[in-house]
Image (cartoon, coloured by chain):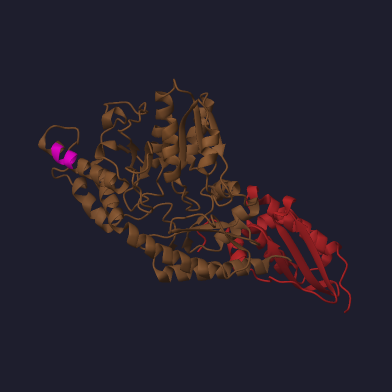
Chain colours: A red, B brown
Amino acid sequence: MNPFGYPDEVWRLFTEAPRAGLLEGPGTRTGSAATPANRSRLQLSARVAGARVEDAKFQAYGCPTAIAVGAWLAERAIGRSLDELAAIGAAEIRQALEIPEERLHCALLGEDAIKSLCRSAPGRDG
Amino acid sequence: MIYLDYAATTPLDPAVFEAMLPYLKPDGMHGNPASDHAAGKRARQAVEMARHQVAALIGAQAGEIVWTSGATESDNLAIKGALEFYAGRGQHVVTSMTEHKAVLDTCRYLETRGARVTYLKPGADGRVAPEQVLEALTPATVLVSLMWVNNETGVIQDIAALAPRLRERGVLLHVDAAQAAGRVAIDLREVPVDLLSLSSHKVYGPKGMGALFVRKKPRARLAPQLHGGGHEQGMRSGTLPTHQIVGMGAAFRIAGERLAEEGAALGRLRERLWARIRELPQVFLNGEGAPRVPGILNVSFGGVEGESLRASLPDLAGSSGSACSSATGESSYVLRALGRDDDLANASLRFSLGRFTTEAEVDQAAEQVVTQVRRLRALAPA
């Protein structure tokens, strides 16, 4: 039931929140972003093995669209290289989740978080 | 769907529905109450019976009840009508920042027409102290408009303490009692309110129906805002909707009969709901410390975002702190005036319980809220 009229994929990802959580430890990277005034916050974490992302999780505070963006990016990251992830932009996120114009900031939040993840240094042992 | 939005509107009581039915059928009860023939007379008798029933709930005389289309119209008629009629006295109104939009928007409109309005800020508990009102009075003050019960928080203003002090000073008092009628005991023989707005659909009556109490002794005067036939002692023209009026009368009669018993039952249900919700950390009761009507519980939830909170509860028909927040993204101006920050005001839920609310519904609602708040908090980054 989606009585509030969110796009179907946003609603699914918001209600199911697949891949919610935080990865820590050796070989993990984290990236985070926030909207002005901290109204939405998104954190992505990924474990990279070789050149590819082996596992990814997200944490988010914000509206359902912001949460859905985090879940989508975590799903999307698995199996991809950091270079591929760094190429994900707001337009792609928006299109995949059918995010309307007035929620563009949520797609931008996602773009900032994924770029932050790709720039981050991998975690060390211990 | 669990309906906990009785402060927004109530379902029609089945007995009200039955009372209205004869006046919707085309068999002789359809006359115009203003007509002299038998059908008109029958309708008029029904209208006058309802007038007595509405008056009885608030300790008024039947002749002091003016039918309107709802509390919004009553508020408009009271405030605009008084300022227009008493224009010679001045053009100053005192009200509060937490009034219903029907009062606030009317005041804003009057400001564009040259009136001056003082918007009092209530204390953190939502109450406006009578002294605050008295201090705001000027020689040009015509009217004070304060709601008896706040629609978002359920906080009860001390109208009984304020009214006599305004009477001494010759300032009219208008009270929006849309949320108060049928929920708190009102006796206008004891409390010298001059004008009082009433709504039918908050009391299990039909929508599109309301009334304005206009005191006869001493007489409060109003300039009519609707012209066309001089109905309702010249204060509100328009053919009377007999079936709606009969419904409002029946609803108010039932409300009077059940006031004490229903209040006690709702109070128990409300406390049951709060007891479960308050097990969560970082929850804040709005209007805490102030007397509140038993059916309303307004809670702000720390650590969750408001829109996600509401979206997480699709089976719960409650309301955000703000009636307008889902449309405009603005947080509740009422909760903001009480000192809640923007995030907390936005992450607020109003649960309003009513005649048909069950213990099972309250338990289910509490469970859903607790589960979803925990889920959203767990999703958030540290």
* Image height of B11 relative to B111, above or below: below
Residue B85 lies in quadrant = top left
Q: State the residue at coordinates (58%, 62%).
A: A11
Residue A8 visible here: no
Main secondary structure along the magenta-highlighted residues: helix
Q: Nearer the viewer, residue A32 or B222?
A: B222
In the orientation shown, which residue stands out farthest toward the top?
B88
* Image height of A80 relative to B209, above or below: below
Q: Is residue A9 left or right of residue B238?
A: right
Magenta-highlighted residues: B41-45
Q: Nearer the viewer, residue B350 or B154?
A: B154
Residue B174 lies in quadrant = top left
In the orientation shown, which residue stands out farthest toward the bottom?
A126
Q: State the residue at coordinates (41%, 24%).
A: B86
* Image height of B363 relative to B252, above or below: below
Q: Residue B129: x and y, percent?
A: 52, 44
Q: Nearer the viewer, residue B232 or A107?
A: B232
